[in-house]
Amino acid sequence: MRPLFRLPRRSAPASRAPATSRDAHWDNLRYLSGTLVVFGHMTDTITDRDGLRWLHIATWALRVPVFVMVAGYFSRADTLTVRETRRLIESILVPYLAIGFLHTLEQRYFYGDWTIKIVDPPWALWFLLSLLFWRMGLPYLAQLRYPLATSVVAALAAGYVNDFGGALSLSRTVCFLPFFILGWKLRQGLFADALRTRWSRNAALAVLAVTAAAAWFVRHDVSFGWLRMSGPYDGGYGLPLMGDWAIRGGVLLCGVVGALSFIRLVPRRRLPLITYLGAGGMYIYVLHPLVLRPVLRWWGMDWVGPWHEQALVVALAVALSAALGSPPVRRLARPVVQPRLPWLFRDTPAPAARGAGTAHPSVPPQKNGDPSARGARDTGSLGRPDDDVLVQRVR
């Protein structure tokens, strides 16, 4: 019988030549998936328009699943150090609280509600809270022999637990965990060769074409609740309650296949404007609800009718995404989205010098067998606050 946990393996020392350029492929993915997220939220309230409902369903796998996989790709499975813990607080927890307070101010202005929502994340902020849990849990999940399979089982089982709902984003944290683990696995080399071959490009094109065609025929049969996975099963899947896991399993499978196809087709080279805007992907994701709430309240979407007006909604989503990822907005919102708060933390003593029995100074310490610890480092979709360049650190 194979053991449940894998033992860490020491790897050969990595090269010390640092790279200072961002990975254009993943920045392209950030912008495109972030734009589709904006489109999805713009069309949540007008689900009776055939064209928009079809596009909403057809692009689901290219939105949040891809965004979560990007975050997993740039995550590390090292045991959390003091420095890493501070980074989680500064780059995820503080923005979650700060942007959540901005949502509270908006709700107070529009609805007179002073409720500060921390336990129940405001619109779209569930991702930040889930990202915090994923980052904290990854060092432990990485010790399992089959972390991806385990995460899928957990996602299917979570629907039977009544306490797994919107509070603390528990349901989405567990249900979207397979995408996060898959992104981390891609960084370790999973499907590395397959995602560069010609046949995989043709297969990816076929997958997205079939998805688009199928989405048209099932557009009125697919519930948006299936795709959100934000709560327990309620029998609304049209199957006996004990069979609801099959629907969620099918959603996860379609999400994985669609997301991988999208990742394969998005160009790896730098694209004019798109690559740069993608470096601010988190700005697009966390700021767009603050813009959409007043727009939808004052302007609404009742004017959307014929096909050309539905196409205009798509164009507006693209324009809003580009604006939120632009340099002026990023400079203005940086203290909230990417704060730098050295005053928040106490000073820590410098690490002790190596003693006589330690490894030779020229040999860098290895990290629990996690290849991602030696490669390019990013904060998922966040990035550092002081520049737009991804500094790759080689341990």
Image (cartoon, grey):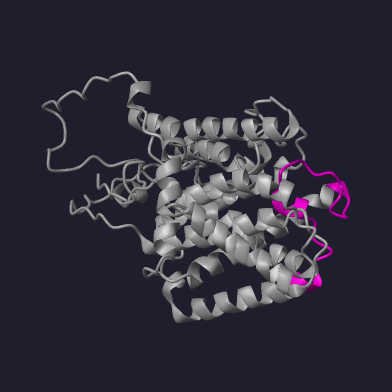
Using the image as rendered, state which of residue 93 and residue 43 is in the foreground.
Answer: 43
Please give the name of the residue rendered at 72% of the width and 48% of the height, measured from the top-left corner.
298
Q: Is residue 103 visible?
A: yes
Q: 178 or 289, which is in the foreground?
A: 289
Question: What residue is drawn where x is 71% and y is 43%?
Answer: 230
| Residue 184 appears in the rendering | no
Please tell me which residue lies in front, 45 or 315. Answer: 315
Place residue 33 in its image quadrant.
bottom right
The image quadrant where one finds the C terminus is top left
Residue 190 in the image, given as x and y percentages of width and height? 45, 61
For image coordinates 67% across by 68% down, the residue present is 312
Residue 265 pos. (x, y %): 50, 72
- Relative horizontal placement of residue 294, taking residue 26 as reference (left or right): right
Q: Is residue 148 above or below residue 110?
A: below
Question: What are the residue bounds of the magenta stretch?
Answer: 215-241
Residue 103 on image: x %, y %: 62, 35
Q: Quadrant of residue 171?
A: top right
> Residue drawn at (32%, 18%), measured in percent from left and top?
346
Magenta span includes 384? no
Residue 209 in the image: above or below residue 303: below
Give the main secondary structure, helix, strand or loop, of the magenta stretch: loop
User: Any magenta on residue 238?
Assistant: yes
Q: How many marks?
A: 0
As drawn, 81 above or below 258: above
Give the percent coordinates (x, y) of residue 213: 72, 76
